[in-house]
Image (tube, rainbow, N blue to C red):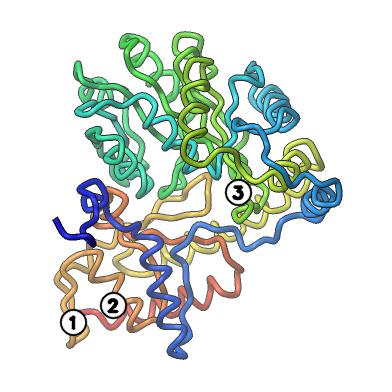
Amino acid sequence: MKVDQVSNRLQALSVSATLAMAQKSRDLRSQGIDIIDLSLGEPDFNTPEHIKEAGIEAIRQNFTHYPPVPGYLDLRQAIVTKMKRDSNLDFTPDQIVVSNGAKQSICNVLLSIVNPGDEVIIPAPYWVSYPEMVLMAEGVTVAVTSGIEQNFKITASQLEAAITPKTRAFLFSSPSNPTGEIYSKKELSELAAVLAKHPQILIISDEIYEYINYEGKHESISQFESVRDRVAIINGVSKGYAMTGWRIGYVAAPLWLAKACQKLQGQYTSAASCIAQKASIAGLLGDQSVVKEMVAEFKIRRDLVVKRLSAIPGVRTNNPPGAFYVLPDVSAFYGKSDGKMVISDESDLVMYLLNEAHVALVPGGAFGAPGCIRISYSTSQEILNRAIDRIAEALSRLN
């Protein structure tokens, strides 16, 4: 063995496709090329002023020492209040564990429950990191696929067919990254009815895009009594409050699981930033109109992007009701060429658009959605219009 040889665990992992495309965009920008980056899911809004002020005040009040591993009690109480206010769900503070972003919260859960060979069912399309997290936990991802014809949502019968004696967890997001789709209360009820028959399965419900919903009230699978005691809700402040860099996520879970996540986190990161925690309280309990203002703007952008993409020959898209992504089907361009490059798959198309249109997107294969590309519309209308102008022009040159 050589000293510079990394572990088998690391060798098995893939680089995040979204982060890789963002890096390519930065590299091209450093060469003086005007790249429009629609690859990352990051709101372009700044953190609201009252939240920033709470963070500054935390520094003044010397909240600069080690906080408790699961998070400050007042933040966990604020999360409990938010859960009751928004979803009528009852938790206690000791069922909440605050982490360095929702990504760590998901990792905590998986590493706490998955043994080698255990299966985790994940609807596809899925967020790029889900299968890699399962792999880190030495589990096996069982992807259940749904296409644009199903609005990228699996059915209860598909879920039932995927369950085996090795199934340990069901991991999904609603609203979804990368599709923007939302499971309705009826659809969640049908999934819950299947899962209720299999008490060994933990449900991991990623609700980080909860507030970015253009159709009404958020619905959580945790509302159903038959499965409530084995649902881990993942959430955070990044998307809803434009606090991506503050790195605060959390899990609300059965007490046994919360204790497990706390034990795990205590050994490898300890608590999240004390200053970011105090700022998050202001977000969760403060003026919620700032959220509504951001969501209203996201809806305008969604409508703009869907309308313009639908007008491009060969592009098929749905009208996603949440998050800030669209996942158009671009398979009609396979086999076409601009005279220099032949498009064989969505990865080729993404590279073609990066090099010829100078627009950065992410290939759908990374999300378990071959034939599609993910477009993030978490930027201004002016930039979105320029980007789609470039995309349309470049695609028109493929014959």
The vertical placement of 224 against 379, above or below, is above
| Image quarter of the C terminus | bottom left
The residue to which callout 1 is attached is 341
Q: Residue at x 37, y 31 (%)?
A: 110
Q: Residue 221 location, x and y as percent? A: 49, 23
Quarter of the image where one finds residue 396:
bottom left
Q: Residue 64 location, x and y as percent? A: 74, 47
Contact between labelled residues 2 and 1, with CB atoms less than 8 Å apart: yes
Would you call the spot at circle 1 few (<14 residues within 10 Å), some (14-19), or many (20 or more)? few
Between disc 1 and disc 2, whose residue precedes? Answer: 1
The vertical placement of 90 against 15, above or below, is above
Would you call the spot at circle 3 few (<14 residues within 10 Å), some (14-19), or many (20 or more)? many
Q: Nearer the viewer, residue 98 or 151?
A: 98
Q: Nearer the viewer, residue 275 or 90?
A: 275
Q: Amino acid at mark 1?
A: Met
Can residue 149 be spotted in the picture? no
Would you call the spot at circle 2 few (<14 residues within 10 Å), some (14-19), or many (20 or more)? many
In the image, farthest residue toward the bottom: 32
Q: Amino acid at mark 2?
A: Tyr
Between disc 3 and disc 2, whose residue precedes? Answer: 3
The residue to which callout 3 is attached is 238
Quarter of the image where one finds residue 394:
bottom left
Q: Residue at x 36, y 65 (%)?
A: 20
Q: Residue at x 25, y 64 (%)?
A: 346
Secondary structure type for disc 2: helix
Can residue 5 be spotted in the picture? yes
Camera-nearest label, 3 or 1: 3
The residue to which callout 2 is attached is 352
